[in-house]
Every structure is written in structure tokens, then in C-alpha cells.
Amino acid sequence: MKILIISDQKKIKESFYNLNKSNYEVEIVCKANYKQYIKKLSEPAILYFDIFQNSETEYWKEIKSLLKLQKYFLGIIDSKTSVQDPASFFHAGVVDYITKKQLYEGISQKRIKNILDFKKEILPEKQCEKNKKIELSQNRKEFSAGFIPNGEWINAEAGKEYVFYFLFAEIDLASDWKKKCGQAHLKQIKDVFYNYIRQHIEPANGRIWMWNEFGGLALIPYTKKYPDIAVTASKLIAHAPIASCEDFPFKMEISYRLALHIGETTYKERGKTGTIVSDSINFIFHLGQKFAKPGNFYLTEETYHKIHPGLKKLFLPDGIFEDKNILRLKRFILN
């Protein structure tokens, strides 16, 4: 397996020294010549583009060009750890992001193996993705409930039925957390997760509505605009490894799963929802607790049809649950 480093910093190759002991063939080529070199490659490879000494406009131009080469996987080297939002690379389709710290520690065989395992996982999905998309229903559900005027919470009236986006969020392996943490430790984690979700969804016009120990349900009023909550939830999943270090206590790895659905329910204020009967609420809890896998974000088909077209390419068909087509956000590799 060839690993090609596109960089004018020759010393970077030293960080890949451990890979030379294995079956990986590591080469480095300067930025001025890499396009001609790539044309000569006849086998799959992992390409690492070093963004050092390139402006943001310049390196994004190169990244977009490299991503069009379907035969290769693309990684980014940020030797100065200068990028403020690394998740933007993964949203575009990059599979690895290497910072100054990783270069210093050296690139491990395990890291490359994770990328190759990831490749094996998604290739079958890509091959059948086109056929699966054909199976998605062309009939868009029309809702009988009303819309909150202008999507503004101040206009919501208790007792009336509205159309909402329902976002399910819950910490993974909650039972394990209970076993290994003391009560004070556990309470802090639960409180931080609650505030973490709340702080991220409120700018997308979301409100936490039902909540248990380790997660719950948020509501976002439906409007005819593309829902910001779909982008927000995608970022929450992509940023999870970073959030484990920056936002959560004790520097422990945190994992959570998200699910988004659009449906109808009678609206009541939080804390007064015990008498509500709603198929949409039942479904989103079932989707989040029975179908969703750790560390993933899921959409129902109904929601998929509403999100921004540019976001749709990040979702793959992932099966049927309770007679609904479900799509999953592509996985990102950060370690």
C-alpha cells in the first residue's frame, strides 16, 4: 500500500518511519510536482496533503481537486496545528487529520489500519448507494398539523398540534458509566452533557423538551427553510473526539448518538408532557434507543428530503426501522 506525502517539508517523512517497517511504501513529493506524480500511480493509495505555507483559499483549492480522485483517500497534515475547525475537512470527505502532536509522536500502523478498515466498510455502501437511493420514497408526507408562525417559540400555544423536528440525543453505554463512576462524578458528566447539547441546539432554534438521566429529546419548530439542526447535529458527531478533551470533565472519552425525525405532536411546556400521545415521539425514542449505534447520527427519510442538498451527500442508506428508511452520517476517522 502506497502512502504519498505531498509536502515541501522533507523532514515530515521521518514521522512515517514506523510504516516503512511494514508493507507500506512511503514516499514524499514536492507540491510543485505532485500532480504529474499522481498520474503515474497505478494502485490505490493514501495521499497526505501538507497545508503548511498555503493560504486557506489555496489549500482548499488543492483539497477539492484531490477529493475528486476517487481512487485515493486523502489525509491532511497541519504541522502548525493552525486550523480552527478541523471537522470541515471531514465534512468535505477527508479521512485523516494530522497535527504537530501526531507528527512528533510518529504515525502508527494502527492509524493507517483504521483508515483501511474504514475504506473496506464504506466501499460496499458506496457501490449500492445509488440503488438504495432509488428505493427512497418519492412521495413527500403532507402534515395535517399546523406550523408555529415564523418558527418562533413565542408564538407556540400549549395544547395545539404542530410540526417539529425531533432530535434525540443520549450518551452511549450509560449503564457502564453508572458502574464505573461515583455519584458526584456521574452527576457532573450528566450535567455537562445536558448543557453541551443545549448550548449547541439553541442557536438552531432548538429546545430540550424531555430529558432523563443521560439524554432525551429536543424540539425544533418546522419552517420551510433548510433546518439548521441537521448541520448542528452533524458537527456534534464530527466534533465528539475533540469535545471529549475540551468540553467534558476528567478528560475521558465521551460517545453519544443522535437521531433526527420530522413529525407532529401536541405542544405542551416542558414538565407537562406526561399526557401527550404521539406516534412521532414514540418513534424517535425507539430509533434512538433501539436502532442507533454508538457515536452515530441518523436521519429518517422524511427529514433527509428537507435538509440542504449539500449535506445530503454525507448520508448513506442504513436500513429500514419501523417501516421507515433510515440514513446514517458517514463516519469520520480522527485517530
Image (cartoon, rainbow, N blue to C red):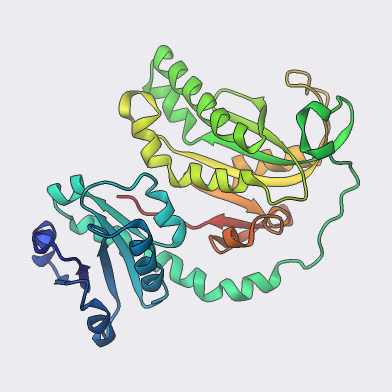
Image coordinates of residue 264 in percent, x first then y, are 82, 41
61 lies above or below 240: below
Image coordinates of residue 291 in percent, x first then y, are 60, 48
Name the residue nearer the viewer: 189 or 42: 42
Q: Horizontally, is 288 left or right of 157 in the view?
A: left
Identify the residue at horizontal 67%, vertical 57% (top origin): 304
Identify the residue at horizontal 23%, vertical 58% (top origin): 53
Image coordinates of residue 124 in percent, x first then y, are 47, 72
22 lies above or below 277: below
Identify the residue at horizontal 13%, vertical 48% (top origin): 104
Screen quadrant of the N terminus:
bottom left
Q: Residue furthest top?
A: 184
Q: In which image quadrant can residue 129 be found? A: bottom right
Q: In which image quadrant can residue 70 be found? A: bottom left
292 lies above or below 132: above
Q: In which image quadrant can residue 14 be found? A: bottom left
Identify the residue at horizontal 46%, vertical 56% (top origin): 91
Name the residue nearer the viewer: 24 or 96: 96
Image coordinates of residue 194 in percent, x first then y, are 54, 25
Q: Horizontally, is 202 left or right of 14 in the view?
A: right
Name the residue nearer the viewer: 168 or 38: 38
Q: Horizontally, is 118 left or right of 133 in the view?
A: left
How many discs mark residues in the rendered view?
0
Name the residue nearer the viewer: 97 or 240: 97
Residue 250 shows in this picture: yes
Residue 331 shows in this picture: no
